[in-house]
Amino acid sequence: MIAAYPWSPYFQGLLDGLGWLIAQIYDLIPNYGLTIIVLTVLIRVVLLPLGVKQIRSMQHMQLVQPKVKALQQKYKGNKQKQQEEVMKLYREYGVNPFSGCWPVLLQFPVLIAMYSVLRFPQHPIHIPADSTLYAAVTVQIPPVTSTSDCLEGMPEVCQATTEPGPSGGTSFLGMNLLCSARDAGNPDATLVDNHKIDGTRIVYDVDCGSGVATRIPYYLFVVFMFGTTYFQQRQMQKASPPGASSSQQQAVLRIMPILFGVFGFFFPAGLGVY
């Protein structure tokens, strides 16, 4: 029996809704990469008010910065009093000193949701079973529902006996978006289900190409993912007035590009497109 889904039913409903939306876009634009790009734009539009709020907060920060410097000079011998007066000034002008970090941090729950929807194989699958996208995915990795569909002599790991179908339904710019950069070019690449059947881990063969040339677009996307995140953080730092960012904020802004680069290497390429 397939293990129960560990997350709350509310999050499950959110993932199912996101999967339904992806499937609807794919029906209109039968290209997996373009579907993810359109979904990304829609999510950015939804999060736009937060971005506007961030910009306004940073503008306010620039306005009060001379006052902050004056307070720092006035209470330079009393760090606690200095901090109290600065925070009081921030509240007076409606400034949030951590606003520069929120847009980046808010990407994590979105990334988790996108990963949960775009990761295949998995149970339950979050895209509708009667959708074109579902057919494009399952033709490559037909779901195993019983260990009788596995190779013999593998009690702990079930190697699915079905051969992977064509990857055209999920290809984009020379990549199979079900694959990660780590598996690119590996003719023996496999995808592992996130749940077990009767205590057995299910492993599927997947077409991630073969040879060094196949890996190039995947690696370029990882570099692009790192570079765009780094550029975004640099722009935030430049927009902030001198001294406005704490050491914690600066650490977050440095770590984020590295984390996103790691995600881009190990996670499905579809998430990298997002």
Image (cartoon, rainbow, N blue to C red):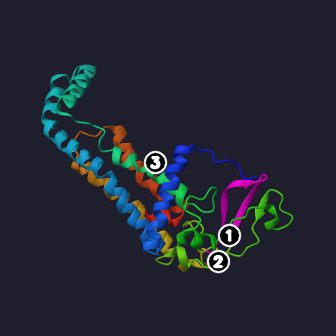
Above or below, comparing residue 10 to residue 85 in the picture: below
Residue 241 visible within the image: no
Image height of 178 relative to 240, above or below: below
Say which quarter of the image contains residue 69. top left
- Image position of 105 with respect to 79: above or below: below
Q: Verify whether residue 75 appears in magenta.
A: no
The three-letter amino acid code for the residue at tag 2 is Gly
Image location of residue 76, percent across then percent down: 20, 24
> Which residue is nearer to you in this view: 221 or 77?
221
**For mark 1, what is the residue?**
142
Q: How many marks?
A: 3
How far apart are the two marked residues, 3 and 1, measured between alpha carbons? 29 Å
Would you say the residues marked 1 and 2 are in contact, meaning their CB atoms lie under 8 Å apart?
Answer: yes
Of discs 3 and 1, which sits in the foreground?
1
> What type is the residue that disc 1 sits on?
Pro
Disc on res. 109: 3
Give the image quarter of residue 9: top right
- Residue 82 screen position, x and y as percent: 23, 23
Camera sees residue 180: yes
For the stretch drawn in magenta, what is the main secondary structure?
strand
Along the viewing direction, whichever of 134 and 155 lies nearer the viewer: 134
State the residue at coordinates (29%, 47%). Answer: 50
Q: Is residue 52 left or right of residue 266?
A: left
Q: Label 2 belongs to which residue?
A: 165
Q: CA distance from mark 2 to mark 3?
A: 32 Å
Which corner quadrant holds the C terminus?
bottom left
**Where are the magenta residues, as a range?**
190-207
